Image (cartoon, helix red, strand yellow):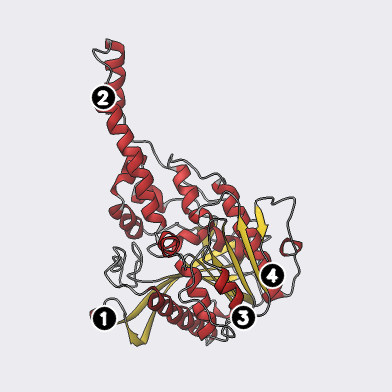
């Protein structure tokens, strides 16, 4: 296995934000400290005005969902009394914050915030250079998500899809995918893995810090993925046994459950499927497997969707049984499968060769098509081979 490539895919999107912001900040500093000799007064005045100008205002928005339904949203808080928190045992039982998205009646509910102020502040505290791009907790939390708090749900039962974000990344970095799945008739549980990212606001209003974000020596990513599998199975159990965890739990079809994840979240999707037979289909979006599945361990449908530079999947592919697809996206980078590239672009940083809008559109289309086929029995030509509408998507094997 390519260790360097593995590590690169484990770097958080927030770390990439820091890198881009640092480059931007460095360039600004050089421009300010190395003026041409004896500039004319007009140039001096221009430099002074630029130095005094306020930081640009960041106004972010996610693309609208593409399905026939609106996306309703609730945030729930769950406590797993059967186990202590693996990272901070002194905090007591494992606490999780989960964003629930569901198919809703258009025109009902109120616009949902992207994140809490505490969660937004947690990201910016780790990445102070983002202030140079005009990003504040207020405007980050105020991003337009196209989800609606308290929206009236569509009738009937719907498949459940659990989403797990990348290492170090909060759950809301998969909001664009989650809202789109909800608009196509899925209930989505977007899980925040406490103490594993820049912050999750818990039931008592506290926002957790990241205990493992700075890569403590000897951190076992197989163990992290296994812990996330326990988180996911606990959430599934609470959503499929009564309505005590979520008042709208009656919407969930407990026989139609899938899971998808980005980066380490993709490894968690595979780990959850191995441990939990209730999960019928899984998606790994550009994540190394932790560990690689052994032959016969994972014989249910699985989609691998990643970059063309991902070289870690051959062994995992050979071990997968049942229906499987391996797709790569030309021009994509590691963050094309989450919201982060779009937010970077909206903050003024350069985009990868694949535009962030295309990255989100491709991710939405293929993940939805996969769950449509494997959970709903709805065939989609997207999964049959290359499409002229999506020339960036390459089929392997």
Marks 4 and 3 in Cβ contact (< 8 Å): no
Q: Nearer the viewer, residue 107 or 46?
A: 46
Q: Earlier in the sequence, mark 1 or mark 3?
A: 1
Marks 3 and 2 in Cβ contact (< 8 Å): no
Left or right: residue 151 compared with residue 26: right
Query: Could you tell me which secondary element the residue under label 4 belongs to?
Result: helix
Q: Give the quarter of the figure containing the C terminus.
A: bottom right
Using the rendered image of the protein, determine whether residue 247 is visible from the camera's viewpoint. Answer: no
Q: Nearer the viewer, residue 373 or 208?
A: 373
> With respect to residue 271, does 358 lie above or below?
above
Q: Position of residue 55 (x, y in %)?
A: 33, 36
Q: CA distance from mark 2 to mark 1?
A: 52 Å
Q: Earlier in the sequence, mark 4 or mark 2?
A: 2
Question: At x 44% / y 46%, what residue is drawn?
Answer: 344
For discs 2 and 1, the disc positioned in front in the rendered view: 2
> With respect to residue 269, does 120 lie above or below?
above
Disc number at residue 34?
2
For discs 3 and 2, the disc positioned in front in the rendered view: 2
Q: Earlier in the sequence, mark 1 or mark 4?
A: 1
Q: Residue furthest front?
A: 1
Q: CA distance from mark 4 to mark 2?
A: 57 Å
Q: Position of residue 294 (x, y in %)?
A: 54, 82
Q: CA distance from mark 3 to mark 2?
A: 60 Å
Q: CA distance from mark 1 to mark 3?
A: 32 Å
Using the rendered image of the protein, determine whether residue 17 is visible from the camera's viewpoint. Answer: yes
* Disc 3 target residue: 280
Q: Position of residue 290 (x, y in %)?
A: 45, 74
* Disc 4 target residue: 372
* Disc 1 target residue: 89
């Amino acid at each position: 296995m390519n260790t360097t490539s593995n590590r690169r895919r484990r770097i958080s999107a927030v770390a990439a934000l820091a890198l881009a912001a640092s480059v931007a900040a460095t360039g600004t500093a050089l421009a300010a400290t190395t003026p041409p000799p004896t500039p004319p007064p007009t140039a001096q005045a221009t430099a002074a005005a630029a130095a005094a100008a306020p930081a640009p205002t960041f106004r972010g928005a996610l693309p609208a969902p593409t399905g026939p339904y609106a996306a309703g949203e609730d945030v729930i808080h769950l406590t797993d009394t059967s186990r202590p928190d693996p990272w901070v045992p002194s905090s007591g039982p494992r606490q999780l914050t989960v964003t629930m998205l569901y198919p809703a009646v258009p025109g009902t509910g109120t616009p949902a915030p992207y994140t809490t102020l505490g969660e937004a502040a947690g990201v910016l505290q780790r990445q102070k250079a983002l202030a140079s791009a005009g990003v504040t907790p207020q405007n980050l939390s105020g991003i337009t998500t196209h989800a609606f708090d308290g929206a009236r749900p569509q009738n009937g039962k719907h498949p459940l899809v659990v989403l797990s974000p990348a290492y170090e990344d909060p759950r809301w970095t998969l909001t664009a995918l989650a809202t789109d799945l909800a608009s196509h008739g899925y209930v989505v549980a977007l899980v925040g893995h406490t103490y594993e990212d820049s912050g999750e606001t818990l039931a008592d209003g506290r926002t957790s810090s990241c205990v493992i974000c700075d890569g403590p020596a000897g951190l076992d990513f197989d163990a992290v993925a296994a812990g996330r599998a326990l988180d996911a199975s606990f959430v599934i159990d609470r959503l499929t046994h009564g309505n005590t965890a979520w008042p709208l739990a009656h919407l969930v079809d407990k026989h139609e459950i899938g899971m998808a994840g980005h980066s380490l979240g993709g490894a968690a999707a595979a780990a959850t499927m191995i441990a939990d037979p209730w999960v019928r289909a899984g998606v790994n979006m550009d994540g190394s497997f932790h560990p690689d599945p052994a032959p016969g361990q994972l014989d249910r449908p699985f989609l691998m969707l990643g970059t063309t530079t991902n070289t870690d999947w051959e062994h995992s592919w050979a071990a997968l049984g049942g229906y499987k697809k391996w797709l790569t996206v030309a021009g994509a980078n590691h963050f094309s499968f989450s919201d982060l590239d779009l937010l970077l672009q909206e903050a003024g940083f350069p985009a990868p060769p694949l535009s962030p809008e295309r990255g989100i559109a491709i991710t939405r289309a293929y993940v939805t098509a996969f769950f449509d086929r494997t959970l709903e029995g709805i065939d989609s030509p997207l999964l049959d081979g290359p499409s002229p509408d999506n020339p960036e998507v390459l089929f392997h094997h």
